[in-house]
Image (cartoon, rainbow, N blue to C red):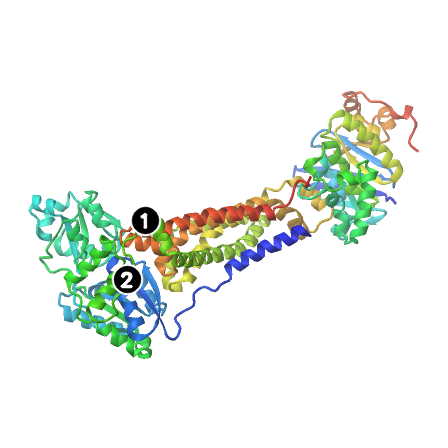
Amino acid sequence: MSLEIELSKVTKSYGPGKTVVRELSLVLPAGKTLCIIGTSGCGKTTTLKLINRLIEPTSGELRIGGRDVLSGDVIALRRSIGYVIQEGGLFPHMSVAQNVGLVARLLAWEPERVARRVDELLELVNLDPGEYRHRYPEELSGGQRQRVGVARALMADPPIVLMDEPFGALDPITRIGLQNEFLRLKRELGKTIVFVTHDLPEAFKLGDLILLMHAGELMQLGTPHELLRKPASSFVTDFLQAHTIHDPQGDAPDA
Amino acid sequence: MRETLQRLVWVGLLVAALTPAVSAGPAAGRIVIGAKNFTEQIILGEMLAILAEEGAGLEVVKKFPLGGSHICFEAIKKGEIDVYPEYTGTALAAILKLPIVPDRVAVYKSVKEAFEGQYGLTVLKPLDFNNTYTLTLTAARAKALSVKSITDLVPHAREMLLGCTHEFVERPDGLPGLQKTYGIEFREVKALDPGLTYKALAEGKIDVCDGYMTDGRIKAYNLQVLDDDRRFFPPYQALPVVRTEIVRKHPKFREAVERLGGLVTDEEMREMNYAVDDGGKTAEEVARAYLASKGLARHPIAGAKVSSHSGFLAYMWDRRAYLAGLTAVHLQITGIAVLLASLVGLPFGILLSRKPQMAPASLMIINVVQTIPSLALLGFMVPLLGIGAVPAIFALFLYALLPIVRNTFTGIRGVDVALLEAARGLGMTDRQVLFMVELPLALPVIMAGVRTSTVINIGTATLAALIGAGGLGEPIFRGIAMVDPNVILSGAVPAALLAVAADLLLARLEMALAPRRRSKR
C-alpha cells in the first residue's frame, strides 16, 4: 500500500525574514521516491518534518492520498508514517526488538503479533533475529543501527516513509551496501518515500524524483535525467557541476 | 517481568523501612519531659523523670536536650512536652519580657501569675539554688588585672574577647542589659555552645565568658567569678513548669515534684554538674544518687552499672538498644522527608521541563530556602508546627527539594533532542514521550539528586534533636552539653555510617531501576 503526497503553497515562517520554506508545491505520486537535496539550511529537513507535522506549516495545504491531513489527529498521522533519522535515532534504553516494535506497542497490538512482525522485519533488513533481537543499540555498529531504524519505521506497514539523511553518518562501504538494500526494499515494498540527503550521488541513485532546494525555495523538481538534461536555472547547473553525476537514464530505468 | 518484580521489591522495601508511625503526642499515663541543652538542665530533666516514674508511676518520654529556652517554652505551650525545668529570671526577662527586679519572691510571684493566668501552665515550688548568670575569667588573669567585680572589668573590656552562649547575646537579662547597666563594651563578642565556653576560656581562646553560678567547671578550671556589684542579674531559681492539665490528671506527679521544692543548694548543684561534666558520671546516675540521698528515689543497685566507660566501642555496645532506636527514628525522619520531597519535587521538575521559562525563578526560590541556615529553619518551624518530628520533617523536606527538582529538570532537559524528535515522529503522545523516553533516560540524573538529598538530610537531621525530634543528634547535643566525646561520637559515628550506607543503598537502587543499555551475555 502506498499513498500520494501533495504539498500546495506550503510556507513555514518563524517571523519576518525568517521564512525557512516558501510557497512549496509538489506532488509525489504513490510508490515513488523523492530525494530532497540542497545546501545546508535550504529547508530540506524542514520540508520533511512538515509532512509528519513535527513542524506545523504557517500556511498552505498538505494532502496525503487526497485527504487533508493538517486538520486531523496528528498522533494518528505520525503512526501511519514511517520515520527514519540519522544514525537510526534508536532509544538506547530499549532492545532492538523493543525499538522495532515500538509503534506496534503504541497501537496496542497483541505481543505475539508484535514479536512475529519484529522477526519478519529484522530478516527483511538482513539482521538475524535470534542474534540481534535482544541486543541494545550501543552494542550495534552504525550500519546495524541504521537497519534497525529502517525496520522500526516499517513496523506498522505505513504507506509512507520519511527518511532524514539516514545514511549520512556511515562509512562509504556500509553506505553503498545500505543504498543497494534500500533499492531492493523499495522494489519489494512499493512505499511512497521522501528521502533527505546532502549527498548528490545518493539522491540520483535512489530517487525517482529529485527536489533541489535553495533558501527555502524550490529550484527544480524532476527526474534525475530532467535535472541533468534540462536544468531550470544556472543555479541548478552550478550545483550539479560541483559533483560528478552519473545519469541513471543510461542504466536500466526504474519500472 | 523479572525487572518489574525486582523494582517492586525495592519499592516495597523502601516503603516498609519508612512506614512505622512517627512518635505520637502525649497519651494517658504518659508524661513527656523536656529540658534545655546544658548539663544542669539535663540533670534536672532526669530528676523529673525519676520522680514521675517512681513517685507517680507514669511512663516517661524524655525529649531532651531541646535547643534553648525559646524552644522549650513553645513546646510546652503547644502541649508537645508536659513539663520542663525553667529558671525564674529567664522566665521573667527572656520569656515574659517583664522588667528585671532583684527580689527572689517578687520574681517568682510575677512568673507564677503570668504562666498560670496566660498560658495554662502550673509553676511548682522552686528549688533552692540560684543559677545566676555571671561573668568569669581565669583566676590568674583576674589577679593580674586585680578585677573582682563587673565594674572593675569595664576599663579592660575594650581589649577583651567575650565568648558566651547565643542566648546570652540576645536576652535582655544577658549582654544587652549588662551593657546598659554597666556601660561595658567588649572588643569582640563570639557566640558559642554552652558546653564549650569554659574550655575556650581555660585554653585562652577567649578572655571572658558568661557563666552559670552553679557550674562545676568554674571550680574545675580555676576561674574567677565576678561580683554583680550593681545587682543587675535577676535570681534564677530552678522552677518546674508543668501543663495545668497534667497537674490535674496526675496529682501524684505534682506531689512528687513539690517534695524537691526548696532543696538543692548552690553547692549541691555545682557538685552534680561537675560530676557529669568532668567526673565521668551520667546525668541519670547523678540525679538518682541525689534523690536517693534525700529519700525521694530508690537507691541505685550497687555495682549494677559501671559509670565510667572503658572505651568508645564498649560504650556503644552498652547503649546499643538506645542507639538502634535513635537510628530508626533518624531514618524515619530523613526517609519520610526525602520521600515527600520526591513526591513533590519530581512532578515539579517535570512541570519546569515543560515550561522552562518558569525554571530560573522557581529554582531560585527553592534555592533561597536552601540557603536558610538549617538551625534557623528548624527554629522558625517551632512557632508554626511545634516541636518533634513534624516540624523536623517539614524543614528537611524543604532542604531535600532543591536537588530533586533541579536534577529532574536538568535530567529531562538533557535528553538528546534527536531522540525526542524520533519519539514524536513515531507517533508518541506527550505522555508517552515522558514516560517511555524522557524519564527512563533522565533517571540516573534524578536518582543522583535523590541521593544528594538523602545524604545531606541524614547530616542535617542531627539538628532535629534540638527541636525534640530525636534521632542521632540527641547524643551529639548531650555530648556537647556534657563535654563528653564518647557521647558525641555515639551519635556522630552512626550518623556518618548511616549516610554512607544510604548512599550505597541508593546507588544499588539506582542500578536496579536504571534502564538497561546492554544485553546480558
Q: Is residue B381 above or below residue B509?
A: below
Secondary structure beneath dot 2 equals helix
Please name whichever residue, B38 or B191, is drawn nearer the observer in this view of the structure.
B38
Q: Name the subunit of mark 2.
A: B
Q: Which residue is mark 2?
A: B284
Tell me which corner region of the image, top left, top right, bottom left or bottom right, holds residue B420: top right
Check disc 2 and give the amino acid type. Answer: Glu
What is the tally of numbered marks visible in this picture?
2
Picture coordinates of residue B271, whole percent (x, y): 18, 58
Q: Is residue B185 above or below residue A193?
A: below
Q: Name the subunit of mark 1.
A: B
**Number of other residues with Cα within 10 Å of mark 2, as a class: few under 14, some 14 to 19, many 20 or more:** some
The quadrant of the rendering that contains the C terminus of chain B is top right
Which of the labelled discs sits on residue B311, or is there none?
1
> Is residue B329 visible to the viewer in this orientation of the structure?
yes
Image side of residue B305 versus residue A121, left or right: left
Give the alpha-carbon distance from disc 1 to disc 2, as whole Å.
Answer: 19 Å
Image side of residue B424 versus residue B441, left or right: right
> Is residue B363 visible to the viewer in this orientation of the structure?
no
Image side of residue A72 versus residue B338, left or right: right
Please tell me which residue is depicted at 60% across the width and 49% down the height of the picture. B354
Please name whichever residue, B374 or A63, is drawn nearer the observer in this view of the structure.
B374
Picture coordinates of residue B441, whole percent (x, y): 62, 44
Q: Is residue B351 above or below residue B105?
A: above
